[in-house]
Image (tube, grey):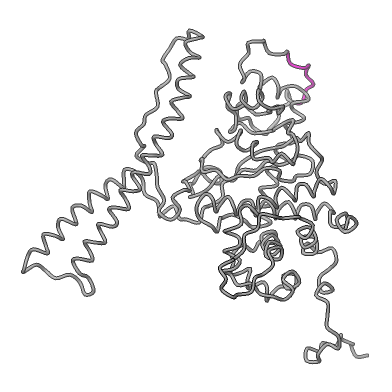
Amino acid sequence: MATRFVSIDRDTPLLLPPSLRDWVPSDHLVHFILDAVDALELRQIRVNTRGTGSEQYPPHMLLSLLIYSYATGTFSSRRIEQSTYDHVPVRLLTADTHPDHDTLCTFRRENQDLLSESFVKVLQLAQELKGLKFGQLTVAADGTKVQANASKHSAVSYARAGEKIDQLELEVQQLLAKAEQADSTPLQDGLTLPDEITRRQERKAALAHARAEIEARAHARYTAQLVEHKAKLAERAAKEAGGKPPQAPSPEPKAKDQYNFTDPESRIMKAGNGQHFEQSYNAQAAVEVESRLIVGERVSAAPNDKQELAPTLAAIPEEAGAVTAALVDSGYFSEKAVTQIERTTDTVIYAAVEKTGHHRSVADLEARPEPKAPAADASVKEVMRHRLKTTAGKTLYKLRQQTVEPVFGIIKSVMGFREFRLRGHKKASTEWTLICLAYNLKRLHRMGAGMKLATKS
């Protein structure tokens, strides 16, 4: 008996116009993003009003396209444009229109306010759909290094910049002397003395600007460290402590302080397991422990998290509700920051005060009585250490690792976002808001919010 195959006919026109929605499963992510963005009442939208005569694409469609593209791992504006031809869900989203890459890039770059507003509105939508509870939040905060759109090889250190300036000055003098010699050896074909002198002078000016910027950063760092140094001296004097006093900070730049010519606002930071360095930004996120939705996000140029606790918690919008507990690792702990937050807000901080291994010994498995409460005059570190040794504290703090770290894993490994496409701190912040917005909608869809949203509509 002959095998019967399904008939494949690519040449006969369809008798009736097809519905693009029928070409994508009803539970597909693209349907949820379209419905969710349509449900947002957005006001902070910037469009092209130059009057060039070009047709405008609806902002809601462009926003939906960017969110869907980032949620599915397409970040380049040229590849997003190509996907409007290649991918059926994207053709549904754009209604078979094809915004060019320049339109997409400009819309993404110019709409920080829109993305921030959308981020908050999605959190409110999550609350309406019972995916995020109202207020009384417990959040886990952390930072992850995301590569800047700049090579670390485009950077120069303070010491190296000084050496290069001296070298360029010497070469300019040599070229000027060569120009005065009538019988000097000619240059290679295509090279002229005036051009070579100008090129070295421009390079010298760029290096001088780099050194000036590094000096300004060093002064800002000195100002911040000086406040901490005076506080340490005052505390030491109050305790009448002996021994060697803490070393005063220096206003001078360090020889290895660096400036990147491609993205000057990014910094060289330890990456991965700390064994190598990359030109990066420090992307911060505060994640609600039950829903694993990102409720606060920001981008910092700080190479570590020492000063990031207060700004990261402050990035959580009021619409998300009050934060009752914040779980952070030892890199965030600072007596000054913890004291400031707990005195001015109702948030209780749970922070490790030293690094500990993940392995539990037999002694760690044994039942223990609750630790004694610290003395009234105990330091913030002693109070924090006691807080994390209580049964309630240990149970709560365990949620940190299983909350925020998987979120970064999804963003980097599943969504594939490991490098910013935009340059500069402000634009990188815009892109991080977009990736967090895309993650939240992807997470809500995973939680089954699509059916709830369809019922609500």
Magenta part of the chain: 365-372
Q: How many marks?
A: 0
> Where residue 454 sits in the image (x, y, percent)?
88, 59
In the current view of this chain or complex, which residue is farthest to the top? 240
* Direction from residue 406 to residue 226 in the image, left or right: left
Question: Is 198 rendered above or below residue 412?
Answer: below
Foreground of the two, 70 or 418: 70
Snapshot quadrant of residue 351: top right
Foreground of the two, 286 or 319: 319
Q: Residue at x 18, y 66 (%)?
A: 193
Q: Residue at x 43, y 34 (%)?
A: 221
Q: Is residue 370 magenta?
A: yes
Q: Is residue 19 magenta?
A: no
> Where residue 15 sits in the image (x, y, percent)?
86, 88
> Where residue 423 sits in the image (x, y, percent)?
50, 55
Quadrant for the N terminus in the image: bottom right
Snapshot quadrant of residue 97: bottom right
Q: Residue at x 42, y 35 (%)?
A: 220
Quadrant for the C terminus in the image: bottom right
> Where residue 242 sits in the image (x, y, percent)?
45, 9
Foreground of the two, 308 or 110: 110
Magenta stretch: helix, strand or loop mostly: loop
Q: Residue at x 26, y 47 (%)?
A: 163
In the current view of this chain or complex, which residue is farthest to the right? 1
